[in-house]
Amino acid sequence: MLESKKLIIPVFYHVSPSVLRCEAHDGPYTKALKIDGKRSESEVKKWKDALHTAAELNGFKHDDYNGDEAQLKTAIVSKVRDHLRASQLPPITPYLVGLKETSKELIETLNQMGEDVGILSLVGMGGIGKTTLAKKIYCCFEKKDMFEKKTFLMDVRESAILDLQKQLAHDLFGEDVRSMEGFHKCFNHVMDCKVLIVIDDVDQKGQFDQLIPDINKLGPGSRVIITSRESNVVNNIMRNGNCKYSRHEMALLSTTDSKHLFNWHAFHSADAIDGFQELAKKVVDACCGLPLALVVTGCFLFDKRKECDLKSTWPQIIKTLLNENKDILEKLMISYNGLSQEARMMFLDIACFMIGQREHIAMQIFEACKSDYKRPIASFNSLKDKCLVKLDEDRRIVMHDLLRDMGRQVVMDQSHHMEKGTPSHLWDPKMVQQVLQNKEVGI
């Protein structure tokens, strides 16, 4: 454990640290480490030194809590939470294109802001890569350990402000707040250190103001990164405070980068396979440099390589993508329409209810719904293969916000065709309240 260089938190449960130091001749470790024919003297010394070092580590003693095990457990959990990486980010896609130079330039821009508080805004349409770029910049700073505290607030548009305030207070101040008033008091008293804050997918200025009530209170050298689809919202935010600002308009991928991204997901290669080069080029052109469309379409077409696919499936996909009357959500529907009935149902369940849920818990729920889910594991794997869902490092379910919006729009569209107009899924508290009060939803 010591050689791993990882954090060790000892818990001395009905035992004294002196036992690890082998101070008592009749102690359990003393007896266990007696030199005999099976153990060399150097090996025993190494173990004793390790135990002695562990005994000196700051930990928990059962006796200090007067036998109150509940209090001891609470203290241990709190300590572990403090040392865990507070903001678990969804994974960055393993095959990044077009972001390396951009991220370097933006990091340099942020570094040049010096001791002033600096704000960087990443603005662009949904699916263009704002969050991916923000994560890449965040991870670069995290590796260099340039900030005393940091936090990444994901998907602000869809999150409750109080939940985000709680995360920010815990990540930056080590405080557990229970109300907005408590957060504001906490914010006003603790902002002395250099912090990095990422606020992802802001669509109202009020969200920013609730999370950073007074930007002038951030410590010298602090940085805030904002991602948003709304240019006017970013403009209003950047009028506040005595800060340095930089705005970055996200560009669509170049033809070369688009080709590489699509081919990687469609063929697991930098180049299209024989017979598909021309069709692949047409798909890439039809996706117009939008990363999400390239990834999702590429994943959908990955197993479409038969002669019949060459003549039918690929041309039909290209025709749909080229339809100027269809917006990006309608074009992303290509992958949804290609799913089995069970996988479609699972996609909608996840889009409405299960984003952020651990995989094993979600699977338990699906497996319990035996009338709807006959092969839940196969259906879930199908969604992963099509790049419609991902798992983060904690095996929590992740879905791009555009795909989530698409799924919820499918639910609302389906409700139009139902007699009472009530959606099959209710994820918004306002919708739930309306159904309970009026037994219907106004759409």
Image: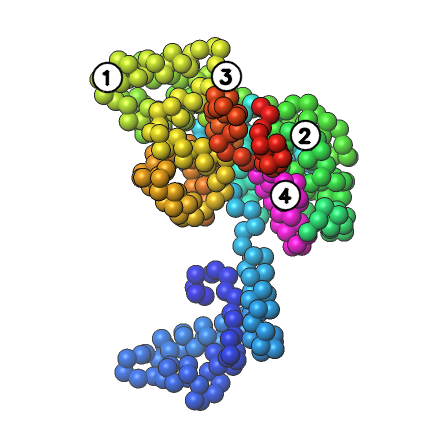
Tell me where residue 326 appears, x and y as whole percent. Answer: 48, 14
Contact flag, marks 1 and 2 (Cβ < 8 Å): no
Name the quadrant containing residue 387.
top left
Q: Distance between the residues labelled 1 and 4?
A: 50 Å
The residue located at (54%, 73%) in the rendering is 56
Tell me where residue 209 appears, x and y as whole percent. Answer: 72, 36
Instruction: Tell me which amino acid carries mark 3.
Output: Asp
How dense is the environment of label 1, judged by Cα within 10 Å: few (below 14), some, or many (20 and up)? few
Tell me where residue 108 appears, x and y as whole percent. Answer: 60, 34
Earlier residue among tags 3 and 2 = 2
Residue corresponding to mark 4: 164
Q: Is 112 or 21 nearer to us in this picture?
A: 21
Earlier residue among tags 3 and 1 = 1
Name the quadrant containing residue 105.
top right
Earlier residue among tags 1 and 4 = 4
Residue corresponding to mark 2: 204
Instruction: Tell me which amino acid carries mark 4.
Output: Leu
Q: How far apart are marks 3 and 2 (CA)?
A: 23 Å
Q: In which quarter of the image is the C terminus?
A: top right
In the displayed structure, would residue 77 be above or below residue 345?
Answer: below
Residue corresponding to mark 1: 308
